[in-house]
């Protein structure tokens, strides 16, 4: 009965993962709760993952990465990518493959992509190169370098806990390095030589304030003396409740009034810059609320600050509307347009439900845009003036990271202890405060990994893993160990693209270990094959969070990833099993 319940819950979870109806972490938590409620697992068994050393290590690594990135540790790399020495896409591919990729073996790849995307987009604009030829390799570079060490990906850390609980041995900091180096080098060479096969979707349209104004989505109006808006505040007026309108700017007697504008009491003669379409403008004129103001404010459009921001994977904003989020009040920024799946949405934005991967065009004061750089819920894609991080604690951040690697690499103390000590030193040393440290943690990933861990325990406890392994062993009867490793690798690869890398590891690692024991081989060998397959997602934008991050900014189509990624996936499917056996 327990095996049947686990199988049913597993199928339901897989369908929900693929359908995308619920956030992955919510699916994992619900599954863990149902496994407890049905008696398949005890509470301590189902929730053991949340207190595992690997997940605690992951939380600490996010803080260490934030301390490194925001202390200026990657300034030299950013300067190199933006320098005049990098003139061609081929040169840029070499930097991504041979410089950026190894760094992702030490720092989680998501913050690396977030901090380098604005630099690369600026390079594309200066060189007249399509972002679609640059951003996908950035994501791929962080993936091929992530398997150089145990701390390169969350997948590796989850696997380290699972192999220990299953009795297969222990994974240390450099357990993957002998396999990871050839994988990295092959991937780096492919990025350089295969860059000609990258899609070229041209330069993005100039979705800036002036183009929106020319299209009629930014309109200048003046309040007549008979307007019902005179004498009331914007918050209490009917303007934004009855109409799909945002007030971006207010000028009074030639002076621009400073935001926030919600409590501003409007007066006759005020000139307003509105975001609205022509139908809404006509309704406003018919109700005698506004008159067209001519072009007095048009000369000031160049002074308005605007930027593109991305809703990354795991953002707490995804799944809610702009109105529910009180976006303008929360961030002091106005959404002018939303780019989703290569289409631009500009009407009824208040009712639009945000999704991961959405790209928003914002208008906001410079200070507000700089404030957005400190939140993990949005990624600012534009380089702002003087936006380089402070370097007054760079030496401390770099020293702490080196010591963590040395202590764990020489196995002087456990990895989790080294990471937590490093976090403590960064906070005590004022490299970052406690609030910033907590905000840098991706809690959605922590909940996903902790919840999905329960499925791995259930598969092992109920015997489902052994049953699936027996079926695979019958199919592999008479085949070599190499073929068995290739099959496990490919199955994990497909599961990663359909579900997620964490789900693929949790579900397939117990099965892979049972297959290895049936073939009289080391379960650790098969476990490492699962980790590499789950960490190398090149076939779809939804297989890994960094692929989703570059999807909209690069104006990619869904199949672009498959067309460029399949040679790399095929090569790794053949190479990694051979390296493991050798």
Image (tube, rainbow, N blue to C red):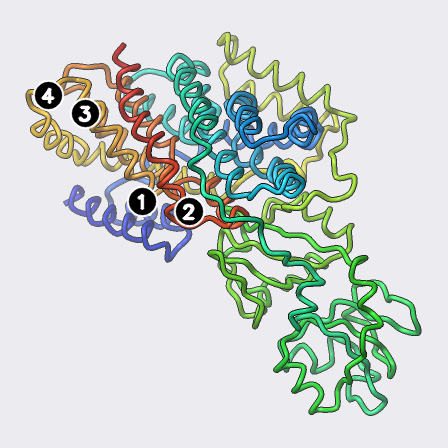
Q: Earlier in the sequence, mark 2 or mark 1?
A: 2
Q: Earlier in the sequence, mark 2 or mark 3?
A: 2
Q: Earlier in the sequence, mark 3 or mark 1?
A: 1
Q: Which residue is mark 2?
A: 25
What kind of element bears circle 3? Answer: helix
* Spatial CA span between label 4 and label 3: 16 Å
Q: Earlier in the sequence, mark 1 or mark 4?
A: 4
Q: Mark 4 and 3 residues: CB-CB less than 8 Å, in contact?
A: no
In front of the other: label 4 or label 2? 4
Q: Which residue is mark 4?
A: 479
Task: Say whether residue 104 is visible.
Answer: no
Task: Say whether residue 307 is visible.
Answer: yes
Tally of numbered tags: 4
What kind of element bears circle 1? Answer: helix
509 in relation to 211, above or below: above
What kind of element bears circle 2? Answer: helix
What kind of element bears circle 4? Answer: loop
x and y percent of residue 150 in the render?
Answer: 44, 21
Q: Earlier in the sequence, mark 4 or mark 2?
A: 2
Closer-to-camera residue (197/4): 197
* Spatial CA span between label 1 and label 4: 27 Å
* Spatial CA span between label 3 and label 1: 23 Å
253 in relation to 38, above or below: below
Q: Which residue is mark 3?
A: 514
In front of the other: label 4 or label 3? 4
Q: Residue at x 26, y 33 (%)?
A: 508
Callout 1: few (<14), some (14-19), or many (20+) C-alpha neighbours within 10 Å?
some
388 in relation to 359, above or below: above
Closer-to-camera residue (12/542): 542
Q: Which residue is mark 1?
A: 498
């Amino acid at each position: 009965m327990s095996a049947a319940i686990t199988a049913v819950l597993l199928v339901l979870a897989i369908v929900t993962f693929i359908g995308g109806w619920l956030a992955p972490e919510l699916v994992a938590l619900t599954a863990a709760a149902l496994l407890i409620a049905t008696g398949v697992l005890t509470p301590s068994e189902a929730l053991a993952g949340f207190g595992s050393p690997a997940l605690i290590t992951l939380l600490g690594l996010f803080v260490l990465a934030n301390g490194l990135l925001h202390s200026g540790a990657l300034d030299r790399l950013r300067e190199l990518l933006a320098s005049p020495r990098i003139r061609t896409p081929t040169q840029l591919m070499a930097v991504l493959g041979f410089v950026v990729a190894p760094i992702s073996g030490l720092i989680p790849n998501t913050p690396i992509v977030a901090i380098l995307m604005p630099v690369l987009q600026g390079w594309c604009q200066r060189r007249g190169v399509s972002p679609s030829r640059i951003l996908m390799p950035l994501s791929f570079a962080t993936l091929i370098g992530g398997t150089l060490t145990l701390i390169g990906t969350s997948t590796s850390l989850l696997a380290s806990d699972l192999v220990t609980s299953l009795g297969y041995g222990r994974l240390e900091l450099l357990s993957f390095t002998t396999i990871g180096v050839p994988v990295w080098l092959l991937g780096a060479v492919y990025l350089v030589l295969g860059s000609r096969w990258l899609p070229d979707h041209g330069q993005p349209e100039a979705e800036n304030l002036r183009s929106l104004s020319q299209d009629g989505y930014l309109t200048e109006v003046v309040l007549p003396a008979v307007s019902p808006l005179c004498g009331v505040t914007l918050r209490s007026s009917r303007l934004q409740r009855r109409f799909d309108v945002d007030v971006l700017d207010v000028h009074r007697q030639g002076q621009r009034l400073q935001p926030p504008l919600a409590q501003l009491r409007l007066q006759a003669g005020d000139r307003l810059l509105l975001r609205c379409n022509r139908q809404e403008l006509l309704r406003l004129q018919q109700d005698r609320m506004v008159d067209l103001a001519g072009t007095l404010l048009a000369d000031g459009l160049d002074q308005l600050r605007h930027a593109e921001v991305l809703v990354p994977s795991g953002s707490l904003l995804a799944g809610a509307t702009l109105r529910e989020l009180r976006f303008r009040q929360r961030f002091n920024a106005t959404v002018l347009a939303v780019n989703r799946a290569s289409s631009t949405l500009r009407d009824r934005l208040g009712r639009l439900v945000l999704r991961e991967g959405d790209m928003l065009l914002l208008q906001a004061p410079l200070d507000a845009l700089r404030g957005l750089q400190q939140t993990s819920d949005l990624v600012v894609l534009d380089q702002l003036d003087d936006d380089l991080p402070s370097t007054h604690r760079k030496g401390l951040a770099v020293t702490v990271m080196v010591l963590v690697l040395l202590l764990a690499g020489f196995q002087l103390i456990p990895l989790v202890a080294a990471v937590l000590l490093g976090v403590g030193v960064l906070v005590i040393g004022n490299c970052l405060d406690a609030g910033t440290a907590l905000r840098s943690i991706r809690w959605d990933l922590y909940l996903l990994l902790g919840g999905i861990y329960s499925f791995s325990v259930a598969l092992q406890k109920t015997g489902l893993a052994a049953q699936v392994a027996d079926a695979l062993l019958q199919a592999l009867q008479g085949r070599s160990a190499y073929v068995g490793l290739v099959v496990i690798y490919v199955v994990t690869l497909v599961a990663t693209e359909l579900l997620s890398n964490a789900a693929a590891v949790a579900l397939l690692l117990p099965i892979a270990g049972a297959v290895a024991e049936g073939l009289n081989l080391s379960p650790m060998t098969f476990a490492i094959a699962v980790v590499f397959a789950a960490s190398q997602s090149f076939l779809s934008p939804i297989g890994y969070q960094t692929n989703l991050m570059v999807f909209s900014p690069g104006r990619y189509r869904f199949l672009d990833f498959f067309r460029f990624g399949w040679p790399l996936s095929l090569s790794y499917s053949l190479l990694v099993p051979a390296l493991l056996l050798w």
